[in-house]
Image (spheres, grey):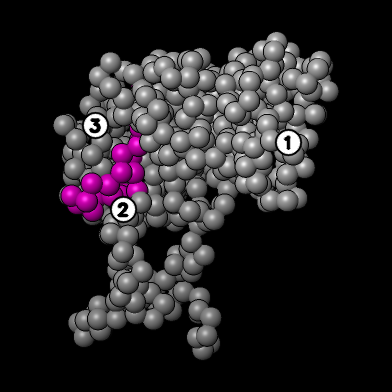
Amino acid sequence: MGNAESVVAQKRLARFRPDERPVIEKVFDRLQEAGSAGKVLTLDALKRSVRDAAPTAMTARLFRSMRSVDTGVPAADGGGVTREQMLVFLADVLRGTAEERAPLVVAMAGVSQGCAVTVTQIREFLEDLISAVVQCLIHRGQLQGWKPDRMEDSDRGVKLLAEQLCSELKCTDQQVCDIPCLENWLFRTSVPLYLEFLSMEALGICLPSRPPLVLLPPCQDVPWRELRSILDLPLLLFLAPQLPDTKGAPWRLLFSSRLHGESFTRLLRGCTGQGPSLLLIRDTDGYTFGGFASQSWDTRPQFQGCSRELLDVSLCVGDGRLCAHTGDSCCFLFSVSPSLRVYTCTGYNQHYMYLNHSQQTMPNGLGMGGQHDYFGLWLDSDYGKGHSRARPRCTTYGSPQLSGQENFTLDALEVWGVGEPPENQQTQVKRSILDADPEAQVMMEMAGKTRHSQGLREPEEGEED
């Protein structure tokens, strides 16, 4: 390729490194070998090349988008895709801007250039795209330890995620989107990432400068033979990017009511001191919702939390913190069905997390947001009962009522550890609460009180025998 007719393609090719350009240029030849005649790529040849990596409906959308590319030269006869069109398409999908990708999405939605696209058309495109991503993850073996056959069916999750992405569109009252609307939407959502993943995996592209895209978080030590999870792959695609950086820590199952039984004590034992965690709840009305706790759960009779900025400036005494806050403004609540949404902190208060047990004067249970008896999300220590009293909105997270009814009954509950547990967890278990407060120790000694546990605990590293 070096003639004057492919100036647009040459400019796009320049976006890739010299060692990547041969890879991009050979894609067309490799796909054409699947059965195209002449100098164009046909839809049948593309389908034969992609095979089971993507559904036929999404393959047809990709082909339509390739055909829509304007290279500055007349389109090929016979309705096929030219080499230049393929190259420009790949450059815009893999290295393009939102302005360059928006026309491609319009074509994938089945609309001619220059025409407005409806929200319904975008939603149908998204359902095909997400289904293709899920199928590609399975076909290419990029599940990161997850077992779709032991999880919820993805079909419903595909529709929920497509609807959530559509809700991000800032369209007109007539539910119509123009190109600027799509550009803004593509800039803010994960749709370009899904298109890049699908194009690279389905078309077999491997660029030296681009490690394979990883869309799912890893999981480990999950007893899949016994577990039937209420997670699904589209929900993982949605939730994983919402979490703060967990340094690639694998997800760990801390509690499942289907596996561990219906016990609040067992729930406490599974989730306390385990680092960041994600709760997923389904009530008997079929509503699914939950919350993300950014720090370890800790039993105490008050809300746990502080602003993110204060986490690293808590006052310390020796190795024990006087103020051991858990929970910060990274916490959030979310709904899964009937609609997929995330509700982040409003800044109104710091009532991020609450966990209490065996107290007579304070509520006993697990809660997030709001206030006592009016939590955004509450699980009672009398296992199976809960509430979401957030009318009109939870003060902490701005969430509406998440459950089907204000007072709900649990159908299923899962808690997943989504970060490394604290390194000093075992050390903290051995320490007395008085170790963190020297003043309290002095007051007890002045009052003639004896610390009976002092002689019973094992000496710490560095202490004399």
Residue occupying the point 40% across, 27% down: 179
Q: Give whichever of discs 1 and 2 has the lower sequence position.
A: 1
Q: Nearer the viewer, mark 1 or mark 2?
A: 1
Residue 353: in magenta span: yes
| Cα separation between marks 1 and 2 | 57 Å
Q: 10 Å neighbourhood of mark 3: few (<14), some, or many (≥20)? A: some
Q: Is residue 51 left or right of residue 295?
A: right
Q: Between 158 and 208, which is closer to the camera in this rendering?
A: 208
Q: Between 100 and 129, which is closer to the camera in this rendering?
A: 100
| Residue on which the image places disc 2 | 329
> Compared with residue 326, is residue 452 higher up or lower down, i.e. above or below?
below
Q: Quadrant of residue 441?
A: bottom left
- Confirm whether residue 333 shows in the render: yes
| Cα separation between marks 1 and 3 | 60 Å
- Confirm whether residue 229 shows in the render: no
Instruction: Pick out the residue farthest to the top.
Output: 78
| Residue on which the image places disc 1 | 3
Which quadrant is the N terminus positioned in? top right
Residue occupying the point 43% across, 19% down: 114
Q: Quadrant of residue 455?
A: bottom left
Residue occupying the point 81% across, 20% down: 34
Residue occupying the point 50% across, 79% down: 460
Q: What residue type is disc 1 on? A: Asn
Q: Give whichever of discs 2 and 3 has the lower sequence position.
A: 2
The magenta stretch spans which residues? Answer: 331-355
Q: Between 191 and 293, which is closer to the camera in this rendering?
A: 191
Q: 10 Å neighbourhood of mark 2: few (<14), some, or many (≥20)? A: many
Q: Element at badge 3?
A: loop
Task: Pinpoint residue 180: horizontal percent, then vertical percent.
Answer: 37, 31
Q: Quadrant of residue 187?
A: top left
Tags 2 and 3 in contact by the CB under 8 Å rule?
no
